[in-house]
């Protein structure tokens, strides 16, 4: 993309587009199942601490790297790293992470399309809870439809990205993100009035730290990075589109607040229902797809709500897949000099070639495990629990120790024209606190 086309048109556009990239299946699908697997409230508490202490400063760091360099994730380290070429490998790690995430994420995004079809044709309404579960299993374990829907989702994303994202996505995000939020609020009201809701709320909000393990803490960190799209280059890429006069702390804080609110709302919808319908909160990736149809079935006009909800969820997923593809396309266009259309078609084809194996992980390839995990689970864990935290650690070392402090300040204050009263605190966090915390959590997570 030529530099003159680079850029969001306004601060609010930048916030909404980046928040659109952040808010997605990570909030509504991944967050509840991670929390369910890790005992509930304690996970939420640690998650929020990570968002505030590491997530927001790290997002600023990525914005600084992107906006300073005006580049894709590989070009950013090539430019800012100067003669220290080794930093480019951090950019390449970002490209690899984008490929892996997109490969399994597009599977779940495809599931959303299936649920739009099912709910519009009334196929999930009036079913008993165990029948709802069977519908999901029959679909996800198949060897055709999960691939078809994944393909459609990849194609849809490629289409939008080829057309040029900024205007389309800025506009779409502005209308649809608030709508998703409102719908989640409506569903909260319903879920909270189910019999047994209190148990769900207790599970979500009452921390019991005795249930927390080292692995759980690492997963909470991984979830905060996954949800905020950190540690791999999505926010470096989007950061390069933010206007110089925008305040990066304000932008990052808004994105983190929106993102966390959506995750918590999703939790308030899902956990009361999990307990009301006698389900296991630790049922893994299918949790949301089995719980939500039950919530809709218990609501008046539930079917209409179901259609609207899955359409919005699909759109939330789309604004995220767009940001994933944009990382790859910006790289291919700027570094390899491919045309935008070719770049998005080729990247999507590569993702499909890898992602098809993830789509089949629930059925035909269920037994094909590596380290005891299916390819889907492996990519999910590898990216969120390892690549993103390690990528984040290297980014803080890059900006906190390698790149000159004066340059960082210059970027954040836009050459001294913006006030940045918290600069000292920010710099201290990324230079000392974040790297040390990341090293401890990564090691502690690996050993226990
Ligand atoms: N943050 C997105 C979500 O929560 C997922 C994502 C991760 C998107 C990394 C881009 C990069 O759904």
Image: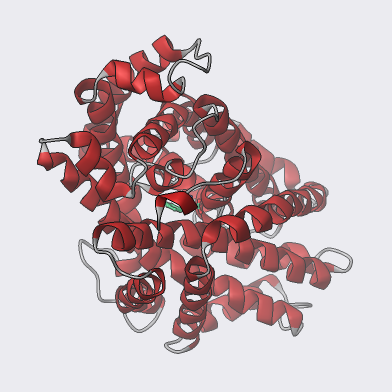
Q: Quadrant of residue 211?
A: top left
Residues 298 and 387: in front is: 387
Residue with the most extreme right position: 300
The answer to whether 290 is drawn above or below residue 245 in the figure is below
For residue 61, side relative to residue 204 (left or right): left
Q: Is residue 207 visible?
A: no
The answer to whether 218 is drawn above or below residue 287 in the figure is above
Residue with the most extreme front position: 4
Q: Quadrant of residue 276?
A: bottom right
Q: Is residue 22 visible?
A: yes
Looking at the rendered image, the quarter that the N terminus falls into is bottom left
State the residue at coordinates (61%, 37%).
11
Coloration of the structure image:
secondary structure
Residues 117 and 366: in front is: 117
State the residue at coordinates (24%, 70%).
369
Residues 72 and 58: in front is: 72
Q: Quadrant of residue 53?
A: top left
State the residue at coordinates (31%, 78%).
353
Residues 77 and 213: in front is: 77
Q: Position of residue 41 (x, y in %)?
A: 55, 35
Looking at the rendered image, the quarter that the C terminus falls into is top left
The answer to whether 143 is drawn above or below residue 225 in the figure is below
Q: Position of residue 303 (x, y in %)?
A: 80, 72
For residue 219, side relative to residue 298 (left or right): left
Q: Position of residue 229 (x, y in %)?
A: 44, 46
State the residue at coordinates (88%, 69%).
301
């Amino acid at each position: 993309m030529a530099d003159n086309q680079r850029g969001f048109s306004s601060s609010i556009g930048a916030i909404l587009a980046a928040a659109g990239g952040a808010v997605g299946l990570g909030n509504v699908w991944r967050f509840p199942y991670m929390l369910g697997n890790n005992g509930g409230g304690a996970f939420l508490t640690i998650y929020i601490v990570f968002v505030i202490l590491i997530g927001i400063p790290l997002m600023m760091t990525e914005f600084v790297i992107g906006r300073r360099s005006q580049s894709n994730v590989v070009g950013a380290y090539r430019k800012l790293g100067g003669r220290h070429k080794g930093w480019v490998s951090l950019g390449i790690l970002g490209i690899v992470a984008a490929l892996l995430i997109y490969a399994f994420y597009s599977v779940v995004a495809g599931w959303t399309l299936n649920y739009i079809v099912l709910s519009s044709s009334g196929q999930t309404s009036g079913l008993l809870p165990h029948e709802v579960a069977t519908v999901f299993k029959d679909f996800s374990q198949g060897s055709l439809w999960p691939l078809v829907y994944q393909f459609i989702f990849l194609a849809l994303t490629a289409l939008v990205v080829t057309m040029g994202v900024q205007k389309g996505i800025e506009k779409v995000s502005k209308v649809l993100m608030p709508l998703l939020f409102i719908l989640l609020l409506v569903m909260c009201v319903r879920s909270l009035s189910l019999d047994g809701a209190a148990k769900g709320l207790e599970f979500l909000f009452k921390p019991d730290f005795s249930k927390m393990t080292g692995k759980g803490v690492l997963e909470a960190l991984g979830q905060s990075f996954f949800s905020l799209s950190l540690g791999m280059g999505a926010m470096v890429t989007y950061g390069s589109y933010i206007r110089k006069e925008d305040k990066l702390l304000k932008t990052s804080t808004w994105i983190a607040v929106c993102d966390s609110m959506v995750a918590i709302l999703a939790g308030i919808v899902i956990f009361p229902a999990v307990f009301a319908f006698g389900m296991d909160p630790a049922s893994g990736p299918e949790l949301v797809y089995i719980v939500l149809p039950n919530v809709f079935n218990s609501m008046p006009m539930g079917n209409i709500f179901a259609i609207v909800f899955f359409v919005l969820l699909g759109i939330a997923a789309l604004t995220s897949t767009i940001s994933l593809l944009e990382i790859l396309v910006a790289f291919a266009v700027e570094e390899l000099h491919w045309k935008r259309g070719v770049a998005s078609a080729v990247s999507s084809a590569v993702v499909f070639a890898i992602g098809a194996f993830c789509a089949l992980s629930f059925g035909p390839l269920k037994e094909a495990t590596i380290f005891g995990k299916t390819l889907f689970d492996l990519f999910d864990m590898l990216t969120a629990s390892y690549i993103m935290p390690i990528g984040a650690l290297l980014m803080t070392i890059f900006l906190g120790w390698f790149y000159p402090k004066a340059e960082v300040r210059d970027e954040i204050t836009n050459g001294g024209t913006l006030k940045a009263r918290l600069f000292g605190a920010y710099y201290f966090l990324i230079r000392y606190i974040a790297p040390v915390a990341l090293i401890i959590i990564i090691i502690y997570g690996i050993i226990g």
